[in-house]
């Protein structure tokens, strides 16, 4: 693809959407056209399996303080933890195929959620910490278009809970944060700390993504 691709990944509440919007505003102000894509853990061929998981209790949903949560305990089933990642590879490729057909040559692509987020979800749900080293994980890494400018935003669990109300009772939040941390190291992905000063994080992001010095 000839398009310039920008991808910001990270756990829920790390500030991805907010910073990506700042990047998009700056790009549009410079006269470019953008396409914002949110593609995370699509359910197509995996839908019947998801229904089964809810029926047998491998998927649990609960509501606290008006916020709905769900968690998948696929690691409790050898079969589900084996077949679900395979179906997710298929589903992701199907969804991405149709998304790519919509992209125009002059557009700059902005990924809010994409392949690494789907891979992170799979690791959390199956507890397979080496999944990114298997052929399944490699398929998600290969899905990244060439010349993608990518960062992972790092924010500590307690700060995420303070900033984002709908993470207050997320039982898996610490695990999600840890997964992104080790993926960034193992896959050698640029990390930007977004724990404290937002302006500093934004400036560092602009410098890396847009090659801005000031």
Image (cartoon, rainbow, N blue to C red):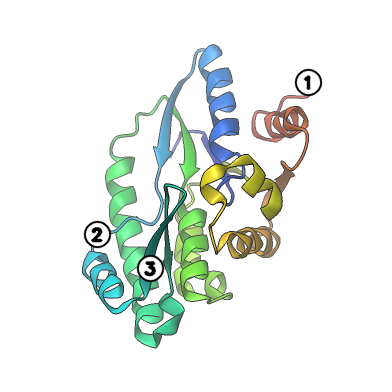
The span from disc 2 to disc 3 (Cα, nearest Å) is 20 Å
For residue 204, which numbered disc appears in the image? none
| Visible residue check, residue 147 | no
Q: Position of residue 185 (x, y in %)?
A: 71, 61
> Quick check: 120 left or right of 1?
right
Local SS, label 1: loop
| Marks 2 and 3, the one that precedes in the sequence | 2
Local SS, label 2: loop
For residue 44, which numbered disc appears in the image? 2
Nearest the viewer among 192 and 157 is 157
Q: Residue furthest front?
A: 65
Is the residue marked by circle 3 packed among few (<14), some (14-19), or many (20+) residues within 10 Å? Answer: some
| Marks 1 and 2, the one that precedes in the sequence | 2
The span from disc 1 to disc 2 (Cα, nearest Å) is 44 Å
Q: Position of residue 3 (x, y in %)?
A: 46, 33
Q: Residue at x 51, y 46 (%)?
A: 166
Determine which residue is flagged by label 3.
60
């Amino acid at each position: 693809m000839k398009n310039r691709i920008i991808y910001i990944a990270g756990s829920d509440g790390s500030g991805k959407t907010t910073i990506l919007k700042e990047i998009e505003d700056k790009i549009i102000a410079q006269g470019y056209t953008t396409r914002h894509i949110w593609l995370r853990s699509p359910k197509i061929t995996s839908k019947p399996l998801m229904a089964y998981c809810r029926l047998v209790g491998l998927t649990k949903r609960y509501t606290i303080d008006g916020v709905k949560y769900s968690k998948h305990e696929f690691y409790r089933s050898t079969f589900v933890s084996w077949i679900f990642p395979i179906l997710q590879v298929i589903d992701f490729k199907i969804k991405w195929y149709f998304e790519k057909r919509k992209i125009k040559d002059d557009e700059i692509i902005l990924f809010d959620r994409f392949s690494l987020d789907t891979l992170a979800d799979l690791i959390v749900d199956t507890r397979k910490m080496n999944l990114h080293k298997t052929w399944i994980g490699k398929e998600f890494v290969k899905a990244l278009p060439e010349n993608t400018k990518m960062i992972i935003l790092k924010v500590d669990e307690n700060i995420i809970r303070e900033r984002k109300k709908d993470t207050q009772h997320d039982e898996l939040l610490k695990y999600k944060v840890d997964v992104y941390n080790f993926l960034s190291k193992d896959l050698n992905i640029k990390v930007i700390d977004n724990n404290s000063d937002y302006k500093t994080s934004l400036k560092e992001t602009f410098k890396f993504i847009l090659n801005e010095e000031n």
